[in-house]
Image (cartoon, rainbow, N blue to C red):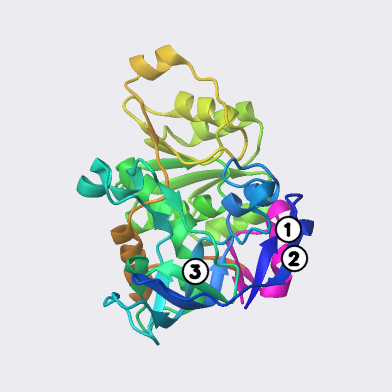
């Protein structure tokens, strides 16, 4: 089978098409004919050599978390899916032994990791992690859900977002930002988001963004958001200076959910403001398999339509990463092997 592998950790130019043996399933595994696999900044960090997960000893490395396709074969102990089933993969990998695997939520597993290997014609996966797709959900749409939308869904739930809340999303045109706008809108929350691109913000307003702030300077952002209102919640995938700005803007008792470090992995915050304001900072990674099932159901009923910027062939995987690196896209970038 063919795969789009990372042969060098130098960015998009490091992607090469290679041939690999077609995998065989273990007793509890399934082989999926990959119809679509979206890419994420997690993959790009690996490709740029900016991830502790993968080093040069692992090359060539096949990334890709968000797999959707058709089951080809299954192992002898699998009874949850069958050949011919259309499926999407929940990319969570958990130990199954720790207290969080026993009692939940599973994404707090003490050995939590994520599946890699979707940027290929076929993928060998844990069959118990496959979710069947209704007829109304195509594989390309399904592949948009697992990382960005699942992460956003879990963050909104952790931050207890409800009707009427004002949700501040710095860097709103990223994958988690776009998903957060759409999902917050579904529960009746209002959103304010920032970007350096007025054109991108126009696209987000068409998707439900209530207030757009065209700025990247933290002081400019702070002034603009204060003129709109006092956020109840901050959805923070940027880190860096935006963490302090978000906490300053939060109302008393407000909540910030943090899932990433796109801007910087370190932030400075005003500790007295945090405790005197009774504000909460919540770390959040991915989500749970039932939450992904809920997203599939929302797509099937027509309540959610994931934003997809472009699709690429397997040979164009490097170009997909170049588009992500250039920050030209609003919505998901999806490879269709």
The residue at which mark 1 appears reads as 7
In this rendering, the label closer to the viewer, 2 or 3: 2
Answer whether residue 330 is magenta in the image. Answer: yes
Image position of 100 with respect to 27: above or below: above
In this rendering, the label closer to the viewer, 3 or 1: 1
At mark 3, the secondary structure is strand
Image quarter in which the N terminus is found: bottom right
Answer whether residue 158 is magenta in the image. Answer: no
The residue at which mark 3 appears reads as 67
User: Mark 3 or mark 1, which has the lower sequence index?
Assistant: 1
User: Mark 2 or mark 1, which has the lower sequence index?
Assistant: 1
In the image, the segment drawn in magenta is 310-337
Where is residue 290? Give x, y as percent. Answer: 29, 60
Q: What distance separates the C-alpha of mark 2 from that of mark 1?
A: 6 Å
Where is residue 237? Give x, y as percent. Answer: 52, 41
Where is residue 335? Give x, y as percent. Answer: 62, 71
Image position of 335 with respect to 155: above or below: below
User: Mark 2 or mark 3, which has the lower sequence index?
Assistant: 2
Disc assigned to residue 336: none
């Amino acid at each position: 089978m063919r795969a789009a592998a990372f042969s060098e950790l130098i960015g998009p130019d490091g992607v090469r098409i290679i041939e690999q043996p077609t995998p065989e399933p273990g007793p509890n595994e399934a082989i999926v004919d990959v119809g679509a696999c979206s890419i994420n900044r997690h993959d790009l960090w690996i490709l740029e050599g900016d991830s502790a997960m993968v080093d040069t000893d692992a090359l060539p490395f096949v990334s890709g978390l968000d797999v959707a396709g058709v089951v080809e074969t299954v192992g002898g102990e699998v009874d949850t899916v069958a050949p011919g089933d259309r499926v999407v993969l929940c990319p969570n990998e958990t130990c199954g032994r720790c207290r969080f695997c026993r009692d939940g939520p599973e994404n707090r597993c003490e050995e939590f990791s994520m599946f890699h290997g979707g940027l290929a014609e076929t993928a060998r996966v844990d069959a118990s992690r496959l979710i069947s797709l209704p007829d109304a959900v195509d594989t390309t749409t399904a592949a948009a859900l697992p990382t960005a939308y699942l992460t956003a869904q879990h963050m909104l739930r952790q931050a207890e977002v409800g009707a009427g809340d004002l949700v501040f999303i710095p860097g709103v045109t990223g994958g988690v930002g776009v998903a957060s706008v759409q999902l917050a809108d579904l529960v009746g929350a209002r959103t304010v988001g920032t970007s350096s691109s007025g054109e991108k913000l126009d696209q987000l307003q068409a998707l439900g963004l209530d207030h757009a702030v065209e700025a990247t300077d933290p002081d400019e952002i702070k002034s603009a958001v204060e003129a709109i209102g006092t956020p109840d919640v901050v959805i923070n995938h940027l880190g860096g200076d935006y963490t302090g700005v978000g906490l300053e803007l939060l109302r008393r008792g407000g909540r910030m959910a943090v899932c990433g470090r796109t801007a910087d992995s370190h932030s400075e915050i005003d500790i007295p403001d945090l405790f005197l304001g009774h504000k909460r900072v919540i770390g959040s990674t991915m989500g749970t398999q039932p939450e992904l099932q809920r997203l599939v159901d929302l797509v099937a009923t027509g309540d959610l339509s994931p934003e997809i910027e472009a699709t690429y062939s397997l040979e164009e995987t490097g170009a997909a990463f170049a588009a992500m690196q250039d920050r030209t896209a609003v919505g998901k970038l999806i490879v269709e092997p």
